[in-house]
Amino acid sequence: MSSSLQYAARSRIHYYMSPPGSTPQPVCLITGASAGIGAALAYEFASHGHTLVLTARREPELNTLADAIAARGHARPRVIAADLGQPEGVANLAAALQHAGLDVSILVNNAGFGLLGDVAQLDPAKQLAIVDLNNRALTDLTLRFIPGITRHKGGILNVASIAGFMPGPGMAVYHASKVYVVSLTEALHEELKAEGVKVCALCPGPVPTEFNNRAGMPDDYFPQALSRSAGRVAREGYEGFMAGHRIVVPGGANRVATLLPRLLPRGLVLGFLGWRWWRARRRG
């Protein structure tokens, strides 16, 4: 048995082998699809007729989502469980796609997480894991699949955040990771537009999802005016991506929040954000 097939057996990946010599099927790959914005994006892309592959760590949740999409009358997405935060995660996912005869034409980089707290107090390993998933895995996936995406004149939708436009005392590593995502996306948008490839950064503000619990955020950490549902974020993200936009920021208040750091003195913005984190810490 080949090493790739052995991996599939160990990981309980469910796919069908394509016939020898067949043309790979173009698909839309959505990472971090088991819940939250990723799941909402899966519904959105499926509703517009895209053939989906869903990946995340939690296979039962992925299968539940795939069944729910099929119950709405859409083609059931393929499911590949993979931990992209691990060193071999992206390579294993790519091998599974290749053996299934699938060629990524649209890549939705949604997988990511953050942590609330002072850098000096948080676990260093967990902070480095943010960089591994939010940046290293996203970049690895992008580099691996750009040839196929370009060939199909498809696209890349990177889920960033309004955090990508400002420093973030209290979530320093997370904010820095999203700055990277925004910058990379804008550069690729410019590089690949002549090839007919869409590259877009979806930059939501607060969204009530599992992300907040994992990050350790209290429910009232962000102003309610900035909050948007995962469904609305996915819908606006899809529409902006398909329209060829470089950046999509759902919600007027969030768009203002991304503009202020560019219009006001950097020190003033940093001072305000630092004061806000200091106040939040005092409140516990």
Image: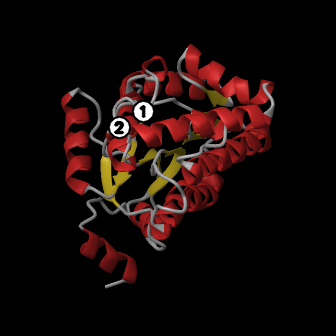
User: Which amino acid type is shown beneath numbered disc 2?
Assistant: Pro
Q: Nearer the viewer, residue 240 or 172?
A: 172
Element under disc 1 = loop
User: Which amino acid type is shown beneath numbered disc 1?
Assistant: Tyr
In the displayed structure image, the side of residue 8 where residue 152 appears, left or right: right
Q: Which residue is mark 2?
A: 218
Above or below 184: residue 200: above
Element under disc 2 = loop
Q: Residues within 10 Å of mark 1 (few under 14, many from 20)?
A: few
Query: Would you say residue 241 is visible in this rendering?
Result: yes
Above or below 71: residue 180: below
x and y, in percent, of residue 90 in the image:
48, 65
Q: Which residue is mark 1?
A: 221
Distance from label 1 to label 2 (Cα)?
Answer: 5 Å
Q: How is the image coloured?
A: secondary structure
x and y, in percent, of residue 195 in the image:
75, 41
Above or below 36: residue 93: below
x and y, in percent, of residue 113 in the image:
45, 50
**Dot 1 and dot 2 residues touching (CB under 8 Å):** yes
Quadrant assignment for the C terminus = top left
In the displayed structure image, the side of residue 180 where residue 20 appears, left or right: left
Q: Residues within 10 Å of mark 2 (few under 14, many from 20)?
A: few
x 56%, y 60%: residue: 131
> Which of the 4 image quarters holds residue 165?
top right
